[in-house]
Image (tube, rainbow, N blue to C red):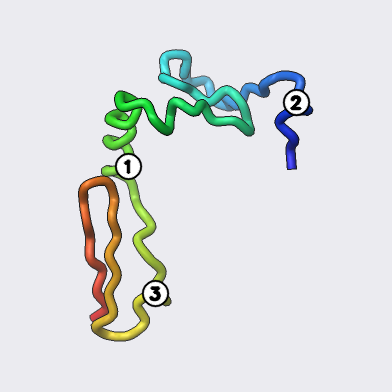
Amino acid sequence: MTNVQDRSSATDVETTDVDTSKVPYRITDDVLIPAERYYDPEFFEVEKQVWLHSWQHACHESEIPNPGDFTEYKILDQSIFLIRQ
């Protein structure tokens, strides 16, 4: 495991030719994520647009093995019920 205190400088993790310089709180280190990504309200609003239109892992089939078994998956203000038939 990498010890953060022993690191002398940040490592740039950009691997594509896409310009990410205007991305708010962009990730420029292969270990640390900017803390603002977790609490900034404007970043949250932008991120919602990504997560609400991306595949989500709601549950594994082993969690609802029998007909009639169900589970609830919550994402933001939405609630989805998965029911085994």
Residue, disc 2: 7
Image coordinates for residue 36, horizontal then vertical, percent: 44, 25
Q: Is residue 58 left or right of residue 18?
A: left
What amino acid does circle 1 point to? Trp
Answer whether labels 1 and 2 touch (C-beta < 8 Å): no
Q: Residues within 10 Å of mark 2 (few under 14, many from 20)?
A: few
Q: Residues within 10 Å of mark 1 (few under 14, many from 20)?
A: few
Q: CA distance from mark 3 to mark 1?
A: 23 Å
Residue at 71% x, 31% y is 4
Residue at 27% x, 43% y is 52
Q: Is residue 3 left or right of residue 14?
A: right
Query: Which of marks 2 and 1 precedes in the sequence?
Result: 2
Residue, disc 3: 63
Picture quadrant of residue 13: top right
Per the image, label 3 sits on a secondary structure element best described as helix
Judge whether 49 appears above or below 62 on screen: above
Answer whether labels 3 and 2 touch (C-beta < 8 Å): no
Image coordinates for residue 16, horizontal then vertical, percent: 54, 25
Per the image, label 1 sits on a secondary structure element best described as helix
Residue at 27% x, 35% y is 49
Answer whether labels 3 and 1 touch (C-beta < 8 Å): no
